[in-house]
Amino acid sequence: MRRYAVRRSLLLAPLWQHKGRLALSVLAIALGVALGYAVQLINQAAINEFAAAVQTLSGEADLAVRGPRAGFDESLYPRLAKLPEVAVASPVLEVEARLPGRREPLKILGLDLFRAARIQPFLSTGEEGDRLDFLRPERIFLSAAASESLGLKKGDALSVQVGLRVLSLQVAGVLGEARRQRFAVVDIGAAQAIFLRPGLLNRIDLRLRPGADPERLAERLRAEMPPGTLIERPDADVGRSGALSRAYRVNLNVLALVALFTGGLLVFSAQALAVVRRRAQLALLRVLGMTRRSLVAMLLAEAAVVGSIGALAGIALGHASAAFVLERFGAELGGGYFRGLAPSLVLDWLALALFFSLGILAAVLGSLVPALEAAGAGLAPALKAGDEERALRRLQPVWPGLAVLLAGAALTQAGPVSGLPLFGYGAIGLLLIGTVMLMPRIAVLGFRVAPLLGPVSARIGLAQLRGAPGQAGVSLAAIVASVSLMVSMAIMVASFRQSLDEWLERVLPADLYLRAGPGSDTAFLSPADQQTIATLAGVRRAEFLRSQRLIVAPDTPPLTLLARAVEAEGRVPPLLGAAHALKPGDPPAAWVSEVASDLYGWRPGAVIEIPLGGRRARFTVAGIWRDYARQQGAVLIERYEYLRHTGDAYADDAALWLAPGADPASVTREIQARVAGGTNLEIAGPGEIREVSLRIFDRTFAVTYALEAVAVVIGLFGLSSSFGALVLARRREFGVLRHIGMTRRQIGSMLAAQGLLVSALGLAVGLTLGWVISLVLIHVVNRHSFHWGMELHLPWQLLAEFVAVMLVLATVTAVASGRQAMSGEAVRAVREDW
Amino acid sequence: MRVALALVLAFCPAILHGQGEYPPVRQGAVLQFPRDHGSHPQFRSEWWYITGWLQAAGGRELGVQITFFRNRPRVAEDVPSRFAPRQLLFAHAALADPLAAGLLHDQRAARAGFGLAQAEEGRTEVAIEDWSLRQTGSGYAAEVAARDFRYTLRFDAKQAVLLQGERGFSRKGPNPAQASYYYSLPHLAVTGSVVIGGRELEVAGEAWLDHEWSSEVLAEEAVGWDWIGINLADGGALMAFRVRSRDGGSFWAGGALRGADGRVRSFKPGEVRFEPLRSWRSPRTGTEYPVSVRVQAGALTLEIEPLMEDQELDARASTGTVYWEGAVRARAGEKAAGRGYLELTGYWKPLRL
């Protein structure tokens, strides 16, 4: 009992004395845990919601046949329905319908209720009403969520845009179940008629007879399915969407881990100095009979207490912010994968336990080295004053650090692991750790080459750093880590933004752009609309684009097919690398995006097959182009080829080159007046589109910016904490300096000079490391995660501002930390030195 | 003038029937066979109704019902899609097994088309997926695979068609428009097999077929009907019905008795009476049905007693109604007079066709 009392006074009391530092450590851990946990919660909520949506909508189906959005021939339906294994085949024509005046399209399911009700039970449990309403072509049923979000109830009219025309459907009822999913139901015959898809379906749900094996049936049917269709378990869609957003999610989680890592580093710098400060106390404990092992355990337990307080606060903060984000913004973190879902927060015990332990782990690992160091010190020297510097010298060997750096460099050459840049992350981690390990040695070198200049106080400051570089080395590590992470992310985002900006300029050469209904598949420009637009006065040239979403492979998300005039108009997209010249007899040209090339292994000269019009059409890859707009890959073909294969003469978008002197605003008015339904077109100039795109980009990277800011704050915490500790440790030295005649002012300027020197060195190393890491981010992490190439662009102004701010903050922090030393009594400070 | 109109009508059948009104049921129209065994897609509704008694080995008795309904909803006739619901088909199948807890029954509903569901014209051939009723050389064949049972049955015609009402024009109310075309085939000889609970039973028995089509049957005031079709033990056949009004009284009634000698006597509304003897309340829907009745048709009085009380058929998932359709015995005084089916509709909610 008594023994513990002594321990408590020796261990916890000093900890409590530094409550400021303690609070900072707790805060850093809390922030890291909160970020990671919140990101995990939000993503999990989104995934759960998406899975629930798929499950509700596919009901009790055992298999689903999926085809291109445009549809496949309905003759597949009776063929499947007559199979002896099939109990019910339910044909579906699903469209994302454009609602005039609303941004979000509405998913409308065209169903044969007689069949769908046997697979999707929620359909038959709606309110009582006229049963024939389910068959009337002008009637539509809304899910409860759709009714709520559209503000429509039974009897109201719902406007739907088809082509550029607006049709009015009457809401015949609100479906009883399937809450929270936003969709509507019409009769399948009406759907084919209204949306002008005669003879086409894009999904068939199958419920099998008891005893039939879905996998075996799917396997057997696969060979005879029409090109561009898939037969699979209904939840395969969840997996595909999960995979689609996985790289983005993993990147966010890694960013959160980075924050945690910085937090751990802060604990390290604080603990290392605290242990040094308490060296004599700890030695005393040893003398009093404490074993090395229990001393280490004690110090680690101390860190664990700090870590768990931080982790607990982090979990609470993370939960609260996840709830807030879901409430305010939905599950969309900026990746664009979960638009339109309104998920609810579900407590994720596994993630909670994981991030809680990660918080503790960060703190414990952070204090492991100092704890081992303290336990390993010789007793007699440790009990003496002035031993601090010697202790830290142990942290200085060079080769392990270099080896870690080399290993990091080697990892950058490895490929992705199941679509994830795991080795890329590993490389960044190793580069960071290696540099941090080398930091004490770099500090020695750096301070040795720094010139002894300026007033006496500055010279003394540098001399002091040269004499005791180890102490600065610890605080340097914190600065370097946070600066390099911040800088690397800033460079990567700036490079991406700049590349996107330049790309937008290249892909938007026309004067005006028209879109029939972005994001929907019911809006289009009919041949008559196209004719009207092309022959308007003021329009020199009109280029029409048709885009379709096609299924090319079972395990990849749908590919976007773009069809427009290419070679005749000299509109081959800017290619990466050389163009492949087609030989006579080659299949026609297709230009594939960088993403599609990566995903499907399509190289220039290769002959590829694309399902078009229910057949496999062959094309020759004529080149690879960069496309930031379509994350799942795109392939561009000549419009006449598309027309030849599909007979589809509609267009989605148009690009207009105006006659000399024509005014975009008056052409816009002309289009709206002359084209039937022209007011439903989205019309924008290239500048506007660029602006909107960059705004979307900034929103997408908002989370990154937030994480960046957190990393910087944690870095500054580290700086202030370690400087405070440094100054505290050197109170005796300041006392001596005051004794030999230095003024407080001079000590202040000496501290400022040291703050400046340390942060300058930290910034120099951090900038260099940040640049290297940004290269890894650009060429490995981004490339592997999103298949997007980009050029390196250094945001000089941002970096310069950052350096200036950090230098000022570091200096101010150093001076502020020194104020305590300056206010203390010189005599008392010297007396500490026995 | 008249010639011109006739030409217009001849070249524009769509005006007459396509998108126009349902054709009326006319007094004096002559039913023609085999044409009228088939579907009449222009009319609003139509059904083929087979009910019968089966005996399995050991004397086990079962009631069997198979009904195909056709409906022309006329809500989407000009929708340019092969899925447009121009004709709807429904089917109910039931087995009354006193050994089972209640009536075993199942249902199907589909829009006609794609070779998955159809009612042919010119002969009886109606099917929804793997459920079917087809005319054969000597009668009919039915195939049903339900949730709890399956059966494959042949029905051989032993007697001529019995035209109901006035040579097939069967009135259902005081307004002549409230009528249907209606004929029956009593005393069909049944053979085949029934699978209940995984056990296959060879069965034989006697059944009754009704085929009826119309465009307008029930008057506004009517809520439903009681109907019996009894294969009399002497080879005769009795059909009797009454349409009930909202107050529970009889709104209209009718029927026909074909004697063993083949002579047919049709009944006027005042000659048919239904008198409830015993009621049964469904534990599922709470509906009360007079499952035992005394029927007077002309000079004939029969007491009707069900094979089992619970023969309620919940068809809300197909035709949207709940009714009682059950195998019954008929007694005249103390003497067994025959066997057949009793149908009680409109007790759950007023019936709408």
Image (spheres, coloured by chain):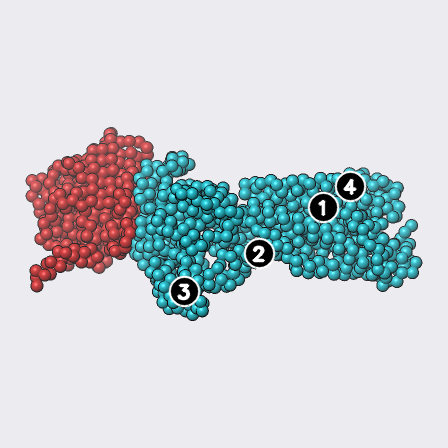
Q: CA distance from mark 2 to mark 3?
A: 32 Å
Q: Quadrant of residue A499?
A: bottom right
Q: Position of residue A245 (x, y in %)?
A: 52, 48
Classify residue B87 as left or right of residue A552.
left
In this picture, is B56 found above or below B313? above
Q: Which one is in front in this view, the residue at disc 3 or the one at disc 4?
A: 3
Q: Earlier in the sequence, mark 2 or mark 3?
A: 2
Q: CA distance from mark 3 to mark 4?
A: 72 Å
Q: Is residue A212 visible?
A: yes
Q: CA distance from mark 2 to mark 4?
A: 40 Å
Q: Are marks 1 and 3 in contact (CB under 8 Å)?
A: no
Q: Earlier in the sequence, mark 2 or mark 1?
A: 1
Q: Earlier in the sequence, mark 2 or mark 4?
A: 4
Residue linked to disc 1: A435
Q: Which chain is cyan?
A: A
Mark 1 belongs to chain: A
Q: Is residue A179 visible?
A: no
Q: Earlier in the sequence, mark 3 or mark 4?
A: 4
- For label 1, the crowd category at 10 Å Cα-Cα, with few meaning under 14, some 14 to 19 and many 20 or more, is many
Residue linked to disc 4: A397
In this picture, is A498 found above or below B204? below
In front: A648, or A426?
A: A648
Q: Secondary structure at mark 2?
A: helix
Q: Earlier in the sequence, mark 1 or mark 3?
A: 1
Residue linked to disc 3: A539
Picture colour for chain B: red
In this picture, is A834 found above or below A403? below
Task: State the mark number for residue A497.
Answer: 2
Residue at image coords 32%, 36%: A84
